Image: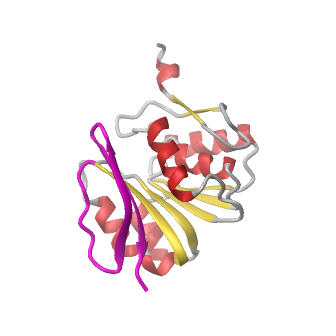
């Protein structure tokens, strides 16, 4: 497989089903595997019609573009790496993804500014960091009632209140779960 073949991810369902999204080679990029994305969107419901989504640590954009493909009203994709953010903008242009907004920023700083509110949030930081737990601590004020938060990590997370885990699973080295806040 060529390097460019490894730097692409396929959208698995919705209006862009089977379309490929390209991303630059970067050691920290680890796109969510097809099987895990399929499970996630089974948990969320196949359609995300009208929902506002946030893709923190967007990387390849696989989760954000998948959400848009399945009817999300909009997805804010936060990515700190300039080249990766530019690739996300290019993928949005190629897909004609009007609901995609790419923000080049540190994810935690983006959360601290806290301007928007979201129905679905994807948190998929580098595994060898504490960024998942730190992001989860900042998220509650940005969530609409009934919001769901998907988290990928290298190890199981033990999150304090107000978080409640709804689902969890594992695929190889990837731990993933779906969370909500308790009232």
> Which residue is located at x 67 percent, y 60 percent?
74
Q: Nearer the viewer, residue 147 or 133?
A: 147
Magenta stretch holds residue 170:
yes
18 relative position to 140: left or right: right
Residue 10 to residue 97: above or below: above
Q: State how the image is colored.
A: secondary structure
Q: Nearer the viewer, residue 71 or 27?
A: 71
18 relative position to 36: left or right: right
Residue 100 occupies quadrant: bottom right
| Magenta residues, start to end | 154-183
The mark tally for this picture is: 0
Q: Residue 47: x, y in percent?
A: 66, 55
91 relative position to 109: left or right: right
**Residue at the farthest bottom position:** 183
Residue 52 to residue 115: above or below: above
Residue 45 occupies quadrant: bottom right
Q: Nearer the viewer, residue 70 or 112?
A: 70
Q: Residue 128: x, y in percent?
A: 24, 48
Q: Nearer the viewer, residue 83 or 3?
A: 3
Q: Residue 160: x, y in percent?
A: 26, 76
Q: Residue 115: x, y in percent?
A: 56, 77
Residue 43 to residue 142: above or below: above
Residue 24 to residue 77: above or below: above
The answer to whether one can see residue 158 in this image is: yes
The answer to whether one can see residue 104 in this image is: no
Magenta stretch holds residue 143:
no
Quadrant of the frame with the C terminus: bottom left
> Which residue is located at x 57 percent, y 75 percent?
117
**Residue at the farthest top position:** 1
> Which residue is located at x 62 percent, y 58 percent?
75
């Amino acid at each position: 497989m060529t390097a460019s073949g490894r730097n692409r991810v396929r959208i698995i369902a919705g209006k862009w089903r089977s379309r490929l999204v390209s991303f630059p080679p970067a050691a920290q990029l680890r796109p969510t595997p097809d099987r895990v994305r399929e499970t996630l969107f089974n948990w969320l419901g196949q359609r995300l019609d009208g929902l506002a989504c946030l893709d923190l640590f967007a990387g390849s954009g696989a989760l954000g573009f998948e959400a848009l493909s399945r009817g999300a009203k909009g997805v804010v994709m936060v990515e700190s790496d300039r080249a990766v953010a530019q690739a996300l903008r290019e993928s949005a242009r190629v897909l004609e993804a009007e609901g995609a907004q790419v923000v080049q920023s540190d994810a935690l700083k983006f959360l601290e500014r806290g301007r928007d509110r979201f129905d679905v949030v994807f948190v998929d930081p580098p595994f060898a960091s504490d960024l998942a737990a730190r992001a989860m601590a900042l998220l509650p004020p940005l969530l609409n009632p009934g919001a769901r938060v998907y988290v990928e990590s290298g190890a199981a997370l033990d999150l304090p209140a107000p978080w409640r885990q709804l689902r969890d699973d594992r695929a190889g080295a990837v731990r993933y779960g779906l969370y909500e806040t308790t009232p």
